């Protein structure tokens, strides 16, 4: 027993070391040159005082439509950077021509400010309001979330947090920079997906037959999703230009394959649900292996498929509802302004969301029998 625990500790430490090297080396290789250079510098500040707003109006190009705006002067104490501790004078510009506007600043607000490089009448760059600083609240929410995971999951809760950390780092420090650098999106999606599957499952459950079965089911499910997504997207004639964000990507210096980007989003989006189903079935099959008195390949397979059928219903609903919820505002807007149902369901934006939901669900459907069959075979080997 001691030797087995020692072996698992060595494997756990090795996976963490491997993950750190993967993120560091991957980031070094995939980050474009000058990626961290340039850009506007933002500072955190707390509003000390707010002056009286100055309101004005101007006309648009048609000469008839009048738009109002206002400038709100404020004083704020800078909380970081070379100006830390200084009380600065800044302004918040509110232009009603734009639909989205931040709330007017108030005393005590935590905000982000900047000092763009243009001159005002006095010949100095003025401080301007950028956005309200909401990061503090989110940090507290994340901390509470992590503490709940640890309280319920204990050691596995800690492993869950570690695996989640490496997943996020792999996506933001390796996957996204690799796309911006122009690497093959199909290849990088496969690499990051396999890394996420392997590292997450081994860290959470250790290296054993249960984990091996879950990895096999995961890889099978994500492979099925990927292949079907490629075939169906070509059959539908998708261009990859879904909305304004994708249009802006076409203006970048490094060309990005938008079809491949849509495919990568489908695979990454389905990965979590497929991982959940595969691990649930593998774990159940492992319990059957330890408790079933007269086990056989077919008896375990039948039990695994029964468990999988229950998982299919809930996880498919979870996946589809997640996609619908994420695109709810877009769907409402399209339905409000386009009453023709045939036009709506032929829009590339809608078709892509439908494709993502269905392909992800197919990945779950593929993962269930793959995990059940492989588990029944592995646990019945002499």
Image (spheres, grey):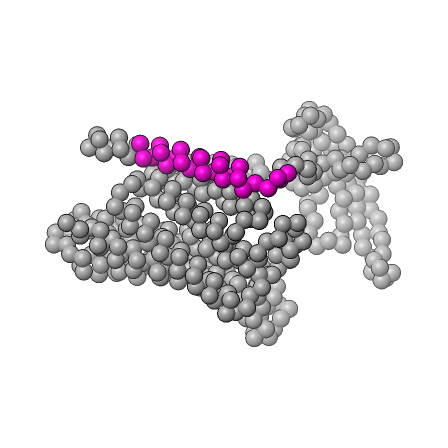
Asked whether residue 317 appears in the rendered view, the answer is no
Taking 12 as reference, is 221 above or below it? below
Q: Position of residue 176 (x, y in %)?
A: 54, 46
Q: Please name the residue shown 85% across and 62% down the image.
A: 62
Q: Please name the residue shown 14% across and 54% down the image.
A: 295
Instruction: Point out the stretch of residues depicted in magenta.
Output: 10-35
Instruction: Give the number of callouts.
Output: 0
Q: Locate residue 293 relative to residue 326 in the image: left or right.
A: left
Quarter of the rendering occupied by the N terminus = top left
Q: Please name the residue shown 29% across and 41% down the image.
A: 207
**Which residue lies most toward the left here?**
294
When asked about the image quadrant of residue 10, the answer is top left
Q: Locate residue 261 relative to residue 73 in the image: left or right.
A: left
Q: Position of residue 84 (x, y in %)?
A: 68, 25
Q: Position of residue 117 (x, y in %)?
A: 78, 36
Q: Position of residue 140 (x, y in %)?
A: 51, 36
Q: Is residue 24 magenta?
A: yes
Q: Is residue 143 magenta?
A: no
Q: Locate residue 311 relative to residue 380 in the image: left or right.
A: right
Asked whether residue 125 appears in the rendered view, the answer is yes
């Amino acid at each position: 027993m001691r030797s087995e625990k020692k072996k698992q500790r060595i494997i756990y430490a090795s996976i963490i070391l491997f993950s750190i090297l993967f993120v560091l080396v991957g980031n070094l290789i995939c980050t474009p040159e000058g990626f961290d250079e340039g850009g506007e510098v933002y500072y955190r500040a707390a509003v000390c005082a707010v002056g009286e707003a100055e309101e004005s109006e101007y006309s648009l190009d048609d000469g008839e439509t009048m738009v109002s705006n206002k400038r709100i002067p404020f004083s704020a104490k800078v909380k970081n950077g070379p100006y830390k501790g200084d009380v600065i004078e800044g302004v918040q510009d509110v232009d009603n021509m734009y639909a989205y506007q931040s709330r007017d600043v108030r005393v005590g607000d935590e905000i982000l400010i900047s000092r763009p490089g243009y001159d005002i009448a006095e010949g100095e760059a003025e401080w301007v309001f950028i956005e309200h600083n909401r990061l503090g609240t989110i940090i507290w929410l994340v901390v509470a979330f992590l503490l709940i995971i640890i309280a319920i999951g204990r050691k596995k809760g800690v492993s869950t947090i570690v695996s989640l950390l490496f997943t996020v780092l792999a996506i933001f420090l390796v996957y996204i920079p690799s796309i911006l650098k122009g690497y093959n999106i199909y290849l990088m999606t496969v690499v990051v997906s396999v890394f996420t599957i392997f590292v997450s499952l081994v860290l959470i459950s250790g290296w054993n037959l249960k984990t091996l079965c879950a990895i096999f089911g995961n890889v099978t499910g994500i492979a099925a999703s990927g292949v079907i997504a490629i075939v169906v997207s070509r059959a539908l004639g998708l261009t990859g230009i879904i909305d304004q964000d994708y249009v802006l990507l076409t203006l970048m210096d490094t060309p990005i394959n938008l079809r491949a980007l849509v495919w990568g989003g489908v695979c990454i989006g389905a990965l979590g649900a497929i991982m959940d189903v595969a691990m649930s079935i593998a774990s159940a099959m492992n319990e059957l292996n330890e408790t079933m008195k007269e086990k056989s390949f077919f008896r375990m397979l039948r039990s695994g498929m029964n468990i999988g059928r229950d998982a299919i219903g809930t996880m498919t609903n979870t996946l589809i509802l997640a996609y619908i919820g994420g695109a709810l505002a877009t769907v409402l807007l399209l339905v409000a302004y386009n009453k023709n149902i045939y036009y709506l369901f032929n829009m590339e934006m809608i078709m892509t969301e439908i494709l993502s939901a269905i392909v992800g669900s197919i990945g779950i459907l593929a993962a269930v029998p793959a995990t059940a069959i492989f588990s029944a075979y592995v646990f019945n080997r002499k």
